[in-house]
Image (cartoon, rainbow, N blue to C red):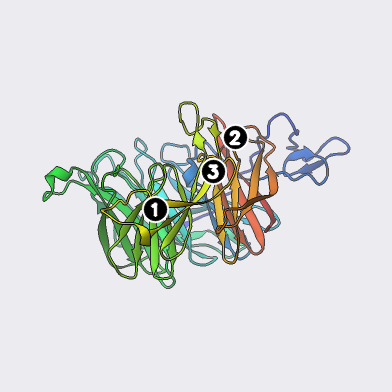
């Protein structure tokens, strides 16, 4: 059992020239020092969770808990802190707990691509963390590495007591990798009394030399403690499409599970009722947001303009679209055959919008809208049946930096929204807590 000890760091927020910072806690007459900023009394100032030198948008994750949320991120092997997976709790009143080291033992190659990871909350004090990465320089095997950890957090208010973590598997899984970018993003999916872990391996089959590089989705069956309960089952995926993909998302409904592959040219693999998997193709840059046992709802973002880069302006309406697996036919991946549900205004694909599905209630959509450096984040309610979107509030960022990621969850009647403000020298995780709309 490895013991990871929590640590804290006090860093002044970077909000630009106005409002002024109050590092000493003092402000001119008529202003209050609110979260390190001199502002008029009652001003809503974003919470600063942490500041790191570099952070990919997909590395910002939120885990709902009984008294708030756990914010999770990673630092990289080439940075001053080395390879670590970290977290901090944020309470409903906006207070940020000490930073905790969740896993510090995973070794990554500082000269290669940063590891991919996913995290799943089992309880307030129990997490599973899956991480995948390229081989280490001294490793003779070209195969990608995959490992799952079980993490034990201290109870709320006792974060300085440290975190216990250990590998949930006897050793790393080594998975076939062929072609560019073939280390997959892993994805953990809760399935009641068990957990499933999805991963895409790539290989060149000896029996099908004409096929070239193929992709196979592997689903590992795990217990709630992360231990493997059965060998992974692999299914051929991405026929006719790029195979250098990761698992971008997963949604479970009763006896069905959709595994969403890639986020540029996405497809969704449906396992239902014990039958053979079927694969559905989504629109370019589409983001799966909700599902029934046989249909998948996805958000088709506004079209990129300019040079079609992620940071370029966008134009046109975003749409909700629904794919029905029972209406599709032919060899996978099935041709795009979906139904428009409704329009959502302008919504960028970068940063990926945050979507919170709620049973029996409209979903919540959080996005900066059309501009990557919008002064505020928009919060909409969305009816998943009609696609009708209603703006319910805005979260003022008090910043003109680019937004690189958004995330949102509902816990205990509050909506927690996190995002990253990115400059040339740092990525800062901000957060706002507001009553659930």
Q: Earlier in the sequence, mark 3 or mark 2?
A: 3
Residue 289, given in percent of the width and then of the height, sits at: 49, 54
Instruction: Indicate the quadrant where residue 284 lies.
Output: top left
Residue corresponding to mark 2: 371
Q: Position of residue 277 (x, y in %)?
A: 30, 61
* Residue at position x 68%, y 45% in the image: 395
Residue at 24%, 46% in the rendered image: 177
C-alpha separation, residue under disc 2 versus residue under disc 1:
26 Å
Answer with mark 3 or mark 1, whichever residue precedes in sequence: 1
Q: Which mark is residue 318?
A: 3
Are the residues at dot 3 and dot 1 in contact (C-beta closer than 8 Å)? no
Image height of 122 relative to 42, above or below: below
Q: Taking 293 as reference, is 141 left or right?
A: left
Residue in the foreground of this view, choosing between 206 and 59:
206
Mark 2 surroundings: few (<14), some (14-19) or many (≥20) residues within 10 A: many
User: Would residue 84 be seen by someone viewing this image from the given angle?
Assistant: yes
Residue at 13% in and 43% down:
210
């Amino acid at each position: 059992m490895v013991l990871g000890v929590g640590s804290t760091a006090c860093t002044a927020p970077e909000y630009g020239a106005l409002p002024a910072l109050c590092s000493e806690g003092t402000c001119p007459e008529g202003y209050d020092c609110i979260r390190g900023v001199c502002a008029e009394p009652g001003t809503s100032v974003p919470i600063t969770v942490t500041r790191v030198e570099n952070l990919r948008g997909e590395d910002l994750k939120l885990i709902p808990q009984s008294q708030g949320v756990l914010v999770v991120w990673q630092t990289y092997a080439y940075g001053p802190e080395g390879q670590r997976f970290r977290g901090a709790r944020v309470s409903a009143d906006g207070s940020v707990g000490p930073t905790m080291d969740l896993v510090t033992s995973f070794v990554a190659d500082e000269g290669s691509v940063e590891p991919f990871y996913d995290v799943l909350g089992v309880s307030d004090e129990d997490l599973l963390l899956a991480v995948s990465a390229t081989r280490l320089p001294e490793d003779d095997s070209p195969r990608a590495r995959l490992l799952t950890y079980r993490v034990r957090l201290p109870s709320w208010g006792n974060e300085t007591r440290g975190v216990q973590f250990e590998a949930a598997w006897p050793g790393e899984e080594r998975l076939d990798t062929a072609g560019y970018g073939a280390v997959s993003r892993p994805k953990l999916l809760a399935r009641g009394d068990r957990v499933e872990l999805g991963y895409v391996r790539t290989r060149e089959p000896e029996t099908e030399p004409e096929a070239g590089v193929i992709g196979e989705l592997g689903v590992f069956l795990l217990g709630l403690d992360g231990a493997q309960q059965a060998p992974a089952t692999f299914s051929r995926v991405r026929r006719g499409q790029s195979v250098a993909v990761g698992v971008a998302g997963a949604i479970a409904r009763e006896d069905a599970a959709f595994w969403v592959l890639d986020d540029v040219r996405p497809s969704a693999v449906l396992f239902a009722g014990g039958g053979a998997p079927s694969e559905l193709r989504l629109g370019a840059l589409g983001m799966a947001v909700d599902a029934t046992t046989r249909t998948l709802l996805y958000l088709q973002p506004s079209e990129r303009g300019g040079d079609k880069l992620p940071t370029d302006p966008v134009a046109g309406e975003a749409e909700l679209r629904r794919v029905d697996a029972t209406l599709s036919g032919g060899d996978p991946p099935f041709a795009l055959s979906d139904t428009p549900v409704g329009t959502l205004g302008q919504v960028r694909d970068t940063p990926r919008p945050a979507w919170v599905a709620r049973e029996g209630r409209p979903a919540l959509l959080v996005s900066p809208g059309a501009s990557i450096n919008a002064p505020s984040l928009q919060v909409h309610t969305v009816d998943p049946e009609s696609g009708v979107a209603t703006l319910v509030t805005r979260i003022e960022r008090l910043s003109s930096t680019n937004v690189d990621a958004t995330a949102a969850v509902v816990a205990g009647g509050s909506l927690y929204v996190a995002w990253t403000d990115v400059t040339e020298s740092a990525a800062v995780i901000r957060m706002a807590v507001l009553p659930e709309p």
